[in-house]
Image: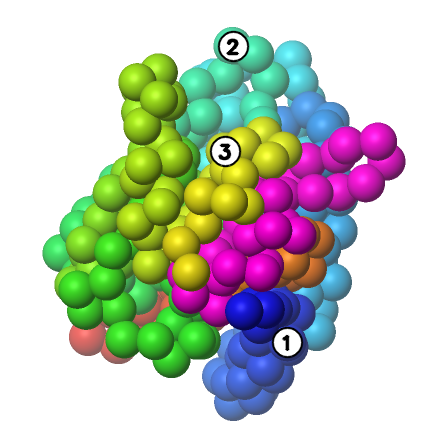
Amino acid sequence: MSAKLLEGKVLADTIKEALRREVGSLEHRPRLVAVQIGENAASSVYCKSQKKAAEYVGIEYEIRTIPHTATQRQCEEVIRGLNSEAAVTGIILQLPVPQGIDHRALLNQVDPMKDAEAMHPKNLGQIVLGEWKMAPCTAHACMTLIESTGIPLRGKEAVIVGHSEIVGKPLALMLVSKFATITVCHIATGERGLVPDHVKRAEILVVAVGKAGIVKGSWVREGAVVIDVGINKVNDTIVGDVEFTEASQRASYITPVPGGVGPLTVTMLMKNTVEAFKLQRSFSKVGI
C-alpha cells in the first residue's frame, strides 16, 4: 500500500477562496489584531503568514507590539483595550510570551467572541458540548484534514500522541463528538513504554509531540490515516514526528511535512476570525 498525501495547501486554497467570497459579501470587513509581546523570530514568521492570508481573504490585519519589559498587568490592559475597540473583531495572542508573563491569564482576558484562536475557556467549553463554531487552529486543521478523507469516524479507533492544549486535548473532544473511540498518549504513556501498542491499534493517528521520528513507521497500522503535526529540523531538513517513508507504505492517507497541517493552520485562524465577526454581528442585532 502507498498512502495518498493529504496536502494542506490544497484544502487551504479552497477554504480561503470561500472565505474571500464570504468576506466580500459582509457589510464590514473583519479586523484581526495579533498581540506580540517582545520579539521572537518564529512568532514574526507566523505573523507574516497571517498577514498574507488575511490580505487575500479580505480581513484587515494589524500587529500590536508590546515591549518585552511590560508587566502582566500592562499586557492585560492592552487585551482589555482591544476588547473594547468596536473595530477590532478578532484577537490572537502570539506565543511564546516572555518569561514571567502568564499566557493563560492573558488568554482568559480575551473577549470570547473576539477569540480568533478559540483558546478562551468558554470556547473550549463549546467543544466539550459539541457546539463549537471556532476551535484551536491546529486542532481544527487536523480535524479538517481527517474529514477530507471522507472516512466515517463513528466507532473508529483514534489515537493522539501528545496532549497539548492547542492540539491533543481539543482534537480529542472534536473526535469524540464524531463518536470515534479516543486514546490520548502523553509522557506517562511513554514512561510505561506503551506508545507503540496504542499506535498499532490506531485507524486514525495524530502525532503532535515535536520530536523527530518519535513514532516509528513500523508501528503504523495498515490502512491508517496519519496526521503528522510535528515540524523538526534535522541536518537542514524539515521532518515530522512520524518516520514518513515506512509509514507512507502502510497508511492509506498521510500528511507530508512540510506541506500538511501547517498551511491549513493559518487558514483556520482566518475561518475563526470570520466566525467571530458573524457571532458579534448576530448578538448585536438581537441587542445582546
Highlighted magenta segment, given as a residue range: 223-252
Residue contact between numbered discs 2 and 1, judged by CB atoms under 8 Å: no
Number of residues whose C-alpha sits closer than 10 Å to that of mark 1, classed few (under 14), some (14–19) or many (20 or more)? few
Q: Which residue is mark 3?
A: 209
Q: CA distance from mark 3 to mark 1?
A: 25 Å
Q: Which residue is mark 2?
A: 100
Under tag 3, what secondary structure? Answer: loop
Rendered residue at 73%/27% (across/down): 39
User: Residue 166, position in %: x, y?
Assistant: 42, 41
Q: Is residue 284 visible in this depiction of the protein?
A: no
In the rendered image, the residue lying farthest to the top is 100
Q: CA distance from mark 2 to mark 1?
A: 40 Å
Rendered residue at 70%/74% (across/down): 56
Compared with 272, 152 (above or below) is below
Q: Where on the picture, by quarter, is residue 255?
A: bottom right
Q: Which residue is mark 1?
A: 10
Under tag 2, what secondary structure? Answer: loop
Under tag 1, what secondary structure? Answer: helix
